Image: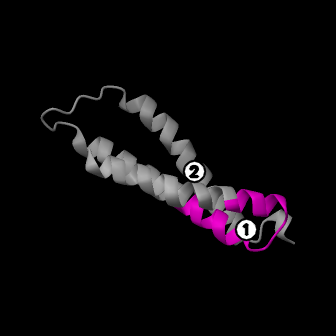
Amino acid sequence: MVFNKAFGAADTFVYLPLLLIGLVGLWLRRKWSVIALAAALGITAYWLIVSLYALYGAIGTPGFSFSNHTLYTAILVPVFVYGLWGLVFLLRGGRSMH
């Protein structure tokens, strides 16, 4: 429970500001926005791998009861791909940064 709260706090105080700053900067076509948005997209990909690993690692653990693994995976994997795609797009220069 403590780790879930810690991840929630980190998302609130680090991820969301980075994402918002990055998106606003991208809208304004500022070069610094790439750094903030790349950090947010990296966190997006990282967090989803943590979630999937924790989910599948907990299967069979006494007291763990989560039955909809397929749906959860079907939601998280595309978001993970989005995070990686966005990161690669930004690191390649992105169309809006030129």
Question: Taking 83 as reference, is 60 above or below it?
Answer: above
Q: Three-letter amino acid code at disc 1?
A: Ser
Q: Quadrant of residue 27?
A: bottom right
Q: Three-letter amino acid code at disc 2?
A: Val
Q: Earlier in the sequence, mark 1 or mark 2?
A: 1
Task: Tell me the quarter of the image containing the C terminus.
Answer: bottom right
Residue 70 at x, y percent in the picture? 41, 31
At 36% from the left and 32% from the top, the residue drawn is 69
At 23% from the left and 28% from the top, the residue drawn is 65
Residue 15 at x, y percent in the picture? 54, 57
Dominant secondary structure (helix, strand or loop) of the stretch shown in magenta: helix
Q: Which residues are magenta?
A: 21-43
Question: Taking 68 as reference, is 78 above or below it?
Answer: below
Task: Tell me the quarter of the image containing the N terminus.
Answer: top left
Outermost residue, top side: 67
Mark 1–mark 2 Cα distance, whole angstroms, equals 21 Å
Between 49 and 47, the residue placed more toward the observer is 47
At 38% from the left and 46% from the top, the residue drawn is 52
Whether residue 45 appears in magenta in the rendering, the answer is no
Left or right of 10: which side holds 29?
right
Outermost residue, right side: 98
Report whether residue 53 is seen. Answer: no
Residue receiving disc 1: 33
Colour convention of the picture:
one colour
Whether residue 39 appears in magenta in the rendering, the answer is yes
Residue 95 at x, y percent in the picture? 84, 64
Report whether residue 69 is seen. Answer: yes
Q: Secondary structure at mark 2?
A: helix
